[in-house]
Amino acid sequence: MALIHGSDAVTDSAEHSRSSMVTTEGLPMPRAATAITIPLQGGLGNQLFELAAGIVVRSRFPRRVHYSDYWLTNPVDGETPRAFALEGLLRRDELVSAPTPRVGRVSDRLMNHRVIERSPDDDALARVGRLTHVLAGYFQRLSYVEEAWPELRARFLNSPNPAHRRLVSPQAGDHGAIHYRLGDYVSNTGANAHHGVTSPDYFVDVIRDGHKRLGITDWRVVSDDTSTALDLLASRGLPSNVALSAAEDGNEWEDLSTLASARACAISNSSFSWWAAFVGASSRPTEVVAPRPWFANAAASEPPLFPDKWLRRDRPLL
């Protein structure tokens, strides 16, 4: 497994010295409690949010952070199976596989031994303290990503995976891009109830607007069910000179680059395309459209995810 190394020797040394520092509360840090474990869960986009949260915790506290793949390799019933997606982005000592219970003792949570994210708008990192040893959640907050971005971008640039380096240095394209999330949003009952399936009308409205205002005629479609996505989009009627095409066959990182390099990008209610839009908009001017509401239940709390410059467009559900 390729993990970042080389310059991290200095970082590891700094971590070792920081483990004997006092905490921000002025109390000695016991060596037995120096590491905080973040269980990885979800797909690529979610794992990037979890990595960002760990970077923030590590910068705010004199604590080492481990990322556990135990939940990925031991999914519970009804959970969409996911693989470890951060190869090349973690340092050699950051990935662990030790069993991490999904539900801890109530006393652990009361004393902040285990900090568990309570809701999409919960600032869980604010509760991390001297005694915390497990931090669990999805951590989908723009403020966490912005705080972590300098180090996270450096990890991408120093990764042995060329797709990581390409992603954070996207070449500006003239195309528009659509991420149409189907897959488990259709097939998994729980995911469908929570996220909903976006109507193609949301995307087609973006395509028409991008064609009218920006003159974009070439639109690339990224999806976990490309054939169905193309059929749904075409069924709603498009301007005669607009061409839809599937993104070139590649892995998830190449799909992210297709989205990030677009002149205009319409994302799904998906952490995957959120990252593509964030990286693209952080690199150069690009127009990002994100759906509203983010969850199927319009009354649910929205995650604090969206930069002011992003456009929000109402999404009907299928």
Image (cartoon, helix red, strand yellow):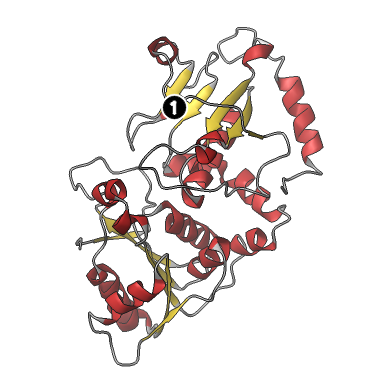
Q: Position of residue 318 (x, y in %)?
A: 20, 63
Rendering coords of residue 134 (x, y %): 52, 23
Residue 12's x, y, as percent?
Answer: 76, 31
**Tally of marks:** 1
Q: Mark 1 is on which residue type?
A: Arg
> Up-down: is 26 above or below 51?
above
Name above or below for residue 318 compared with residue 110. Answer: below
Residue assigned mark 1: 102
Residue 273 vs residue 22, the one in the foreground = 273
Q: Is residue 207 above or below residue 113?
A: below
Residue at the spot 69% in from the left edge and 55% down from the top edge: 157
Q: Is residue 3 left or right of residue 240?
A: right
Residue 301 placement, left or right of 223: left
Residue at position x 52%, y 26% from top?
100
Q: Residues within 10 Å of mark 1 (few under 14, many from 20)?
A: few
Give the camera-side residue of 70 and 17: 70
Secondary element type, mark 1: loop
